[in-house]
Amino acid sequence: MDKVIIMCIDDEPQILDSLRRDFMPRYGDNYDIELCESAEEALEIREEILSEGRKIGIFIVDQRMPGMKGIDFLKQLEKEAGKILLTAYADTEVAIEGINNKCIDFYIRKPYDEMLFDKIDYLMSAFDKGYFVVKARTEEERIEALYLQDTVFSEEYLGLPYEKGKDLIKKSSYAETTEMFVAVKDKEIIGTTSLNRINKDYAKKLGTILGLPIEDYYNIKNVKDVDENLVQLRNAAIKPEYQNMRIGPMIWKEIFKELMTKQPVPPKYAMIISGSRTKDARKAMIILEKAKRLGIYDYEHKVQLKHESKRTEKSISDEEIEDTPLPRLLKLYSKIGFNLNGESYFDESFNQYGYPMLIDCNDIKEPFKSYFLND
């Protein structure tokens, strides 16, 4: 079988020589490297390659070349391959516009460094899985991801029309401060989740994803060492037609790589405001009792909730606990190392029960530790 091709286009021969020299040891076993000195030459060679039934996996193109510019070349390729634009500092706005217009996937400033190889690895993963996961690359993409998240959240979790859910969430400062991670397929965001970096000031002033002060739900002092190193994560929001592609775990993997490898001091805990929701008081009790029975409940680091759950007086039998499946998210989180912390709480704004959970990022259980933290 023919190898997939990485095509590099630059009018400077020394840059092309450098790319070939750096690429061959890394990618030569699985990819052929094709070099072109102009966009016009690349278009001709591309036609020859495609006519032979071969595939070009990634284009790496310099922006400033005589004749056709890099961005104009990439605009002609639509969705057929991954696209990386090499730019000078002055071309940054052109590159950002290219990402927003779905013309390119990434841009790298010259002289290139190890970041180029990171971006190539993202695009290679898209060949294997059909998509890649990355931190939102522009402000416009971050906002687009927020809209997707709000749509899924309002329709699937709250049972509200999209505009109603979006209006509720806009009342918080969440949208202004969050970092978005996105799954991208054919230049389209198909899944997303978000991360907030929280410290004492944040917890006091900015509040939770629900627009309510964090201390309305938690007494943070009851959890050892959490208030200094806390990040807040949302459940992955995936477009319905892609929910069978296991996108959620891959987004989590990218977030944990960010938390564990790119921060001077990795946060000890990631915090889930609610791992699963239900409007049924009795079901909430059964879920909580079963979580305790299965050892998911974390007594040592129990968070004290200020809101009292609404309770039913009817007792719950062992048979009911045994026969009631835990929600999918609680199952997933318990395997990874999440623990339920505190009683289920009732949120009057959304008329639902939630389950607060914490994870110690340094103590994720195997085999999930290797899965999330390693390439």
Image: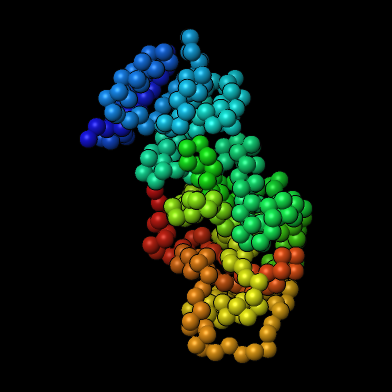
Give the side of residue 226 with respect to residue 113, left or right: right
Residue at the spot 44% in from the left edge and 52% down from the top edge = 245
Residue closest to the eye, 111 or 10: 10
Q: Position of residue 46 (x, y in %)?
A: 35, 21
Q: Where is residue 81 in the image (x, y as percent from the top left)?
A: 41, 31
Residue closest to the eye, 52 or 143: 52
Give the side of residue 22 with respect to residue 353, left or right: left
Residue at the spot 51% in from the left edge and 88% down from the top edge = 318
Q: Where is residue 223 in the image (x, y as percent from the top left)?
A: 63, 69
Q: Tell me: residue 318, above or below residue 220.
A: below
Residue at the spot 35% in from the left edge and 29% down from the top edge = 56
Residue at the spot 62% in from the left edge and 42% down from the top edge = 144
Q: Is residue 35 something that shows in the picture?
A: no
Hey, which quadrant is residue 131 in on the image? top left
For the N terminus, the image quarter is top left
Query: What is the number of callouts on the image?
Result: 0
Q: Is residue 329 something that shows in the picture?
A: yes
Residue situated furthest top in the rendering = 66
Q: Position of residue 338 (x, y in %)?
A: 52, 66
Query: What sort of colour scheme is used for the picture?
Result: rainbow
Residue closest to the eye, 34 or 16: 34
Q: Tell me: residue 163, above or below residue 75.
A: below
Q: Tell me: residue 146, above or below residue 110.
A: below
Q: Tell me: residue 346, above or below residue 204.
A: below
Give the side of residue 94 with respect to residue 310, left or right: left
